[in-house]
Image (spheres, rainbow, N blue to C red):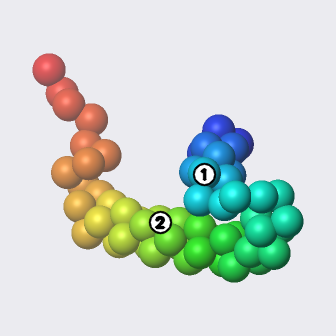
Amino acid sequence: MYATARFNAWVSATGFTSSEEMGAAKQETIEYFVEQYRSMLDENLTDYISNFDGYMRADKA
């Protein structure tokens, strides 16, 4: 998760022209990434709940 956070900080930085501009948008940027992550985690957890037996079934050879 640290690597993802670091990468997202870099992705964000590429959209700004100065540290001041980036600093001014810090809270908005955090809220964006947290909202996106929450949505993706919710979607994937729902998928696993719906398909738990198929995804977690141990193959018996």
Query: Residue 57, percent across and down?
Result: 25, 43
Report if the CB atoms under discs 1 and 2 are less than 8 Å apart. no
Rendered position, 14 above or below 48: above
Q: Residue at x 85, y 65 (%)?
A: 20
Query: Residue 12, percent across and down?
Result: 62, 57
Quarter where residue 30 is shown? bottom right
Q: Amino acid at mark 2?
A: Leu
Tag 2 residue: 41
Rendered position, 55 above or below 29: above
Looking at this view, name the residue that lies furthest to the left.
Answer: 61
Q: Residue at x 53, y 66 (%)?
A: 37
Query: Residue 46, percent across and down?
Result: 35, 71
Rendered position, 44 above or below 6: below
Q: Residues within 10 Å of mark 2 (few under 14, many from 20)?
A: few
Rendered position, 13 above or below 47: above
- Answer left or right for 3 relative to 58: right
First in sequence: mark 1 vs mark 2: 1
Q: Residues within 10 Å of mark 1 (few under 14, many from 20)?
A: few
Quarter where residue 22 is shown? bottom right
Q: Quadrant of the C terminus?
A: top left
Name the disc covering residue 14, or none.
Answer: 1
